[in-house]
Image (spheres, rainbow, N blue to C red):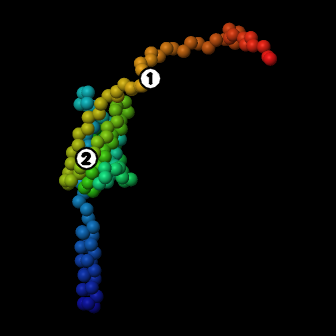
Amino acid sequence: MKRSIATLITLLLCATLFAAADDKPSSQVTVTVVRESNGRPVRNASVIFHTVNKEGRQGKDAYQTKTGPDGSASLSGLDYGKYRVQVIAQHLQTFGEDFEIAQPEKTIEIKLKNPQGQFSVYGDRSTSTPSAPQSPSATPKDNTQPH
């Protein structure tokens, strides 16, 4: 009986040591999203954390959350390492930047810009209003003769 209790205690101790050795340090990250133009919080913005490998390529793992009325969102349990943070909000420019997470708590403030005008290689073409379609009687007739 004493031997089985000692074996059980030894197994529990080993399991605890293996579990502790497998624990990776993790962080609680708080992201605050505001408008660059006026500093107001951006509510309901999508905040996505993509893992980034040692070569700088985006990994397959991603974590997503949304900002609340105060413009902030939190993720806990993120393993230490590099993450590509992407923020998407309606009527604002999408944000993306890499951040190194290496402490138990990290706060990131992101300022979203208003949308920029689009660039075109075709130059600045003024848009004209299309003319109203002509009635069938006003369309020119095909005066070509069959050969």
- Above-or-below relation of 73 to 142: below
Quadrant for the C terminus in the image:
top right
- Position of residue 119 measured from the top left corner of the image (x, y, whole percent): 39, 26
Where residue 122 is drawn, which disc sits there? 1
State the residue in front, 95 or 26: 95
Labels 1 and 2: the sequence-earlier one: 2
SS at circle 1: loop
Q: Furthest-top residue in view? A: 138
State the residue in front, 28 or 147: 147
Q: Is residue 78 visible?
A: no
Real-space Cα separation, disc 1 to disc 2, in angstroms: 37 Å
Residue at x 35% of width, y 49% of height:
58
Q: Furthest-right residue in view? A: 147
- Above-or-below relation of 53 to 45: below
Q: Furthest-front residue in view? A: 147
Residue at x 28% of width, y 80% of height:
11
SS at circle 2: strand
Quadrant for the N terminus in the image:
bottom left
Q: Quadrant of residue 46?
A: top left
- Nearest to the eye among marks 1 and 2: give it: 1
**Label 2 amino acid?**
Phe
The crowd level at tag 2 (other Cα within 10 Å; few <14, some 14-19, many 20+) is some
Whether tag 1 and tag 2 are in contact, CB under 8 A, the answer is no
Question: What residue is pinned by disc 2?
Answer: 99
- Above-or-below relation of 69 to 26: above
Residue at x 68% of width, y 11% of height:
139
Residue at x 69% of width, y 10% of height:
140
- Position of residue 86 measured from the top left corner of the image (x, y, whole percent): 33, 42
Q: Is residue 122 visible?
A: yes
State the residue in front, 48 or 143: 143
- Position of residue 48 measured from the top left corner of the image (x, y, whole percent): 34, 45
**Label 1 amino acid?**
Tyr
